[in-house]
Amino acid sequence: MEKRTYGEMIHEAIEKHEKITKDASEKAKNEEENQMNINPDCYVAREIMYQTAVLKNIENMLRQLLKSGME
């Protein structure tokens, strides 16, 4: 096994860190491109909030039914 100097080891560590940082930066950039913001006052946002409320009500009713059936 060849012996490396501290300078070479430090240089390798810096290169490795730069590669990891670059990869993380590119990944974050790609994820940001796929994100979309919705105006909370638009029809789609209101519909999403309505459907979420309906699902939460259904979930609560199911929990109550399961609780009453288990007693």
Image (cartoon, rainbow, N blue to C red):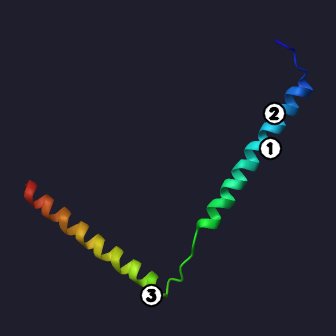
Q: Residue at x 8, y 58 (%)?
A: 69
Image quarter where the C terminus lies is bottom left
Q: Residue at x 13, y 64 (%)?
A: 65
Earlier residue among tags 2 and 1: 2
Earlier residue among tags 2 and 3: 2
The residue carrying mark 2 is 13
The residue carrying mark 1 is 18
Frontmost residue, 33 versus 60: 33
Q: Which disc is residue 28 wearing?
A: none
Which SS class for mark 1?
A: helix
Confirm or deny contact between disc 2 and disc 1 (CB under 8 A): no
- Crowding at dot 2, Cα within 10 Å, few <14 / some 14-19 / many 20+, comes out as few
User: What is the x, y in percent for residue 59?
Assistant: 25, 66
| 3D distance between C-alphas at marks 2 and 1 | 9 Å
The furthest residue to the top: 1
Which SS class for mark 2?
A: helix
Query: Horizontally, is 38 left or right of 1 in the view?
Result: left
- Crowding at dot 1, Cα within 10 Å, few <14 / some 14-19 / many 20+, comes out as few
Earlier residue among tags 1 and 3: 1
User: What is the x, y in percent for residue 44?
Assistant: 45, 83
Image quarter where the N terminus lies is top right
Q: What's under tag 2, amino acid-wise? A: Ala
Frontmost residue, 23 versus 70: 23
Query: Horizontally, is 16 left or right of 62 in the view?
Result: right
Which SS class for mark 3?
A: helix
Q: Which disc is residue 43 wearing?
A: 3
Q: Classify residue 6 by image quadrant.
A: top right
